[in-house]
Image (cartoon, grey):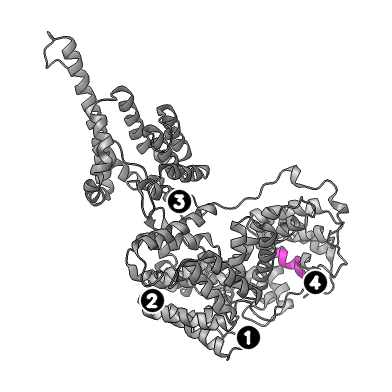
Amino acid sequence: MARVLHRRLLLLAAVSFAVAASLLRPAGAVRPFVLVLSGEDFLKDSAAHPSLPSADSAADDGWDDFADDSPAADPLLSPSSWVPLLDPTSPPPSGDETDSPADALFVAGARAMLSAASDGDDAAFATAAAQFEAAAEAGHPGAQSALAFLTGAGMTRPASRSLAFLLHKFAADAGDLQSKMALAYSYFRQEMYEEAVILYAELAEAALTSSLISKEPPVIEPIRLHSGTEENKEALRKSRGEDDEDFQITEYQAQRGNAANMYKLGLLYYYGLRGLRRDYGKAFHWFSKAVEKGETRALELLGEIYARGAGVERNYTEAYKWLALAAKQQHYSAYNGLGYLYVKGYGVENKNLTKARELFELAAENKEAGGHYNLGVLYLKGIGVKRDVIRAFNLLLHAVNAGQPKAIYQVAKLFQKGIGLKRNLHMATMLYKSVAERGPWSSLSRWALESYLKGDVGKALLLYSRMADLGYEVAQSNAAWILDRYGDQSICMGESSYCTDMERHLRAHALWWQASEQGNEHAALLIGDAYYYGRGVARDYERAAEAYMHARSQSNAQAIFNLGYMHEHGHGLPLDLHLAKRYYDQAVEVDSAAKLPVMLALTSLWLRKNYADSFLVRFIDSLPEIYPVVKEWVEDVLMDEGNATILTLFACLVTVLYLRERQRRQVAAANPQQPDDVAM
């Protein structure tokens, strides 16, 4: 908190604020999204809506989650994808003109750019940009998309949002999905929801389709590099894949025959978690071993693997066998798979919609999100039941708040079309966006994280910045954090060569601002600090107060504390000691860990109120000037928890002793006959 809460109490109390930093740092993860609607959001006569999907309508298969999804190709593997350049094991990109001069220029430029970012070679980076420019002039969508990214960020050329938008538009019109993401995000920021919802709906559908066949996991874990103002070491340690000590222990126990660890290992490989590459073959191996050892939780996963043909030949009969065994063990998620097989008539004697509904209901009754979703689809489409959009939505809502991407997609469509719900393009856009960001292009974050863990900060910054351009909030905050933390100019490419300090500050500020717009409370806090202290921008107390107010709306205790301080001193806000106290008290209500700094702040308020013209108050107000001298000592000495506790108590003790001594002298002056050594 030494850098966030304004250190303006007595010297040792100011030191105590540094100790309290760990108490109020926000968590690394974004708060979970929860969709809550009122009765006013529903249409009164939804059953008669003209665009309601029909069970026997072939014109709107998008409403039917039980269609045969067999995508011909992964949308990620287009000629404009960077993944084949990052992953040597990835199949080569496919396209109509893979051997064209423009395509060769794009590939050469992408390779050169990634290499230059790793090496900090500004000349090679400029060469890569020139290759992109030549390929873009020839109409290559991937090169247009990459050039738009460089132009928007101000790398090797002056930053221009308008030109970047135009280049993304050209690439998107030619089918580049990354540019469609960037374009949709640009529309979203400008509240142009009519345009944004169309693009995000297309991207969300592509994301759901690709998850069926991509080797990338359906959700790339959004790992934050930082937790507050410090590196998120615990999360980073757990993201090292097979190099992680916990993984190695799990693998060792699995190899020794521990069924629970066999199952855990299978999950890690099946979903590609903890920095591991998704590997269906290894997942199938460990799930099979776990079943042999009596681990019943692996039964359902084996059934899903056979139903999807993930790493094995698709076999619905085998899928039914394993899912039925899992259901007998009361693993309720297995009922969803069985219900699907009965809806389609796969692996069973006959299609049976009544049986399917019963299975979905059983899963839903046991709080299984998939059961809520599948049952919702039946009622939405009218498959084997009387169509009921209101009931369908209520079921889907349970699945949405459990994070089920297909449910989020379906509810987004209801909002977009105005079916059962009042048309709400803003809500539809937000929901589609959350699904679209699960698309396989999110795998760039994995490569960014791997680069960071290997110490290749320049490449990590480049990849996070690319994802930031596509609208990923975690990537925006990660890129901003790297820019703020690493002062080495060679990791940041500016307009002509390496970034100047001003370019680095402004780019970080822009990224923090974008992250703040998307709900990152820590980002709003840092924006406020930038304006308050004049870091990279002109000092502006009023804009600092606006940013803190935004963070306060997200229940950020540090921002609330800072607003109290600004009212206490009249910096950008009216001088108001009563309102300052209200903010200090609210900081504790929001986060009980704020008790120590708030106690010190309230001590300062008391001193200011009762001893306004005293030396002590003047000394407190002078701390901003002497703080740079004390800063190094504060950071070096107080990082030890024991020192922090002792000095905090000592600060409080000094304050109390000073006030008691002052009171004794006042009493002595009023009673001159009383001996000086009389205890008070």
Span shown in magenta? 332-350
Residue at which label 4 appears: 344
Is 170 left, or right, of 610 in this rendering?
Answer: right
Q: Is residue 499 visible?
A: yes
The amino acid sitting under disc 3 is His
Residue at which label 1 appears: 95
Q: Residues within 10 Å of mark 3 (few under 14, many from 20)?
A: many
The amino acid sitting under disc 2 is Ser
Residue at which label 3 appears: 522
Which callout, 2 or 4, points to the residue nearer the camera? 2
The amino acid sitting under disc 4 is Lys
Q: Cβ–Cβ below 8 Å for labels 3 and 2?
A: no
In the depicted view, which residue is nearer to us: 402 or 320?
402
Q: Residue furthest bottom?
A: 99
Numbered-mark total = 4
Give the spatial CA distance, label 4 vs label 3: 48 Å
Give the spatial CA distance, label 1 vs label 3: 42 Å
- Quick check: 604 above or below 270? above
The amino acid sitting under disc 1 is Gly
Give the spatial CA distance, label 3 vs label 2: 28 Å
Residue at which label 2 appears: 118
Q: Earlier in the sequence, mark 1 or mark 2?
A: 1
